[in-house]
């Protein structure tokens, strides 16, 4: 009899976990609130260990075929004149792909049951299994439940308590939309800064479109997470009066076919599991978009969680404990990188903005010119990956 696992969330961590669980003989079911795999979205990247996981999944070539191939990103002044630039590796990692394209690849790699247009309403872990009631009214029982449902995880709220206990705001908000490539960006990005604000765009889909970025510093905002029109106006208000291409990007954002807006926050938990429920990806240890490591954490976390379940021979308590230990240091390194990178990407003062630009201009001529890339790759490799398929599963310990 195989172990049944309900996974909440069909973005990146969820399908990646389902892939590995199927490979190890488990029976996963994925529930997703959206009516289908979510298209669109911003570019996501891979560094270090996550590249190895993609290779072990047999998906590295497929991801490379859909890569954005983004080159250097330039910073400009209000007139559009370049004042600094940074390498592609610094912002795009070793490999970058649009989130929607990655979701399609991961979804196609699995053959498990998907429950779209539904979500978990309640969980009851009785020690021997988990009874789940879905918003649709469906009732099912599973051996394990995994929350892969992002920063605002429903599974985490139901099993661990209110979001406010674990969410740590970094003091920034981010918005991303698909817009016309009106600047003619050729596999490149262009950013403009004012204190506490970053606005720009980078080309996508072979330069046929662009992704508009809006980052701004702010105290905690009160807004409806489901009211996209209000969120668009909130972003527009924050960037009103900004020069360069801001007015046009704001107009294009208002009419964009897709729109993302959220706080840049981190999730910090003492444990990534409670009983028969565990968390993976942003639901358990979001590092924020400013880390550049969210997708890597999701892919690596799914690999480690499934692998530890495999070698534990069905003993979920042993597997969850090992998963926690193996991921803890990697999570800490990724979250630290976000804190350090925020002030460089969204400079708070005119003085530091000048320092940032000067530093980037001088970097190619300094002995430590590769420092940014090397630090980024060091974080991406801050975990030693086991080869779980070479490990013999332990005999499960009967429950007391």
Image: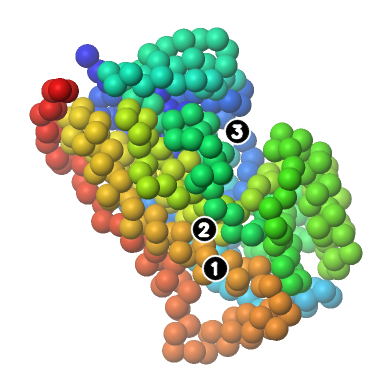
Q: Which residue is mark 2?
A: 292
- Point out residue 119 in the picture as x, y percentages from the top left corner: 55, 22
Quadrant location of the C terminus in the rendered image: top left
Query: Label 2 vs label 1: CA separation?
Result: 9 Å
> How many residues crowd mark 1 within 10 Å: few (<14), some (14–19), many (20+)?
some
The reply to whether discs 2 and 1 touch (Cβ–Cβ < 8 Å) is: yes
Residue depicted at 45% across the width and 78% down the height? 370
Question: Could you say which is closer to the camera, residue 232 or residue 349?
Answer: 349
Q: Which residue is mark 1?
A: 341
> How many residues crowd mark 2 within 10 Å: few (<14), some (14–19), many (20+)?
many
Q: Is residue 114 above or below residue 301?
A: above
Q: Which mark is nearer the camera, 2 or 1? A: 1
Residue depicted at 80% across the width and 45% down the height? 232
Residue depicted at 47% across the width and 65% down the height? 337
Q: Earlier in the sequence, mark 1 or mark 3?
A: 3
Q: State which quadrant residue 316 falls in.
A: top left
Q: Earlier in the sequence, mark 2 or mark 1?
A: 2
Q: Which residue is mark 3?
A: 38
Query: Label 3 vs label 2: CA separation?
Result: 20 Å
């Amino acid at each position: 009899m195989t172990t049944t696992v309900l996974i909440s969330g069909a973005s990146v961590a969820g399908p990646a976990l389902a892939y590995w669980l199927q490979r190890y003989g488990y029976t996963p079911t994925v529930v997703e609130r959206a009516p289908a795999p979510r298209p669109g979205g911003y570019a996501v990247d891979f560094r270090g260990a996550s590249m190895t996981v993609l290779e072990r999944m047999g998906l590295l070539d497929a991801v490379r075929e859909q890569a954005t191939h983004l080159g250097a990103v330039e910073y400009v002044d209000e007139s559009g004149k370049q004042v600094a630039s940074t390498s592609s590796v610094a912002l795009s990692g070793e490999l970058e792909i649009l989130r929607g394209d990655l979701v399609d690849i991961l979804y196609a790699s699995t053959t498990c049951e998907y429950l779209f247009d539904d979500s978990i309403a309640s969980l009851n872990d009785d020690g021997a299994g988990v009874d789940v009631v879905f918003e649709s009214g469906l009732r099912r029982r599973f051996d394990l439940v995994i929350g892969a449902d992002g920063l605002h995880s429903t599974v985490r709220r139901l099993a661990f308590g209110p979001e406010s206990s674990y969410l740590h705001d970094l003091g920034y908000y981010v918005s991303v939309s698909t817009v016309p490539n009106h600047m003619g960006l050729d596999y490149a990005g262009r950013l403009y800064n004012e204190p506490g604000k970053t606005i720009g765009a980078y080309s996508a889909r072979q330069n046929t479109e662009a992704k508009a970025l809006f980052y701004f510093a702010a105290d905690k905002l009160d807004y409806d997470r489901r009211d996209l029109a209000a969120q668009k106006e909130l972003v527009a208000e924050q960037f009103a009066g900004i020069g360069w291409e801001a007015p046009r990007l704001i107009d294009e954002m208002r009419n964009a076919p897709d729109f993302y807006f959220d706080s840049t926050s981190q999730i910090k938990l003492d444990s990534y599991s409670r009983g028969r429920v565990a968390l993976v990806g942003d639901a358990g240890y979001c590092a924020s978009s400013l880390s550049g490591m969210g997708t890597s954490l999701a892919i690596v976390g799914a690999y480690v969680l499934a692998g530890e379940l495999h070698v534990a021979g069905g003993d979920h308590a042993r597997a969850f404990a090992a998963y926690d230990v193996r991921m803890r240091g990697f999570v800490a390194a990724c979250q630290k990188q976000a804190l350090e990178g925020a002030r460089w990407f969204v400079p708070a003062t005119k003085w530091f903005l000048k320092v940032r630009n000067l530093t980037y201009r001088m970097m190619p001529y300094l002995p430590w010119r590769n420092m940014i890339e090397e630090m980024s790759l060091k974080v991406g490799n801050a975990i030693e990956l086991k080869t779980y398929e070479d490990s013999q599963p332990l005999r499960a310990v009967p429950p007391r």
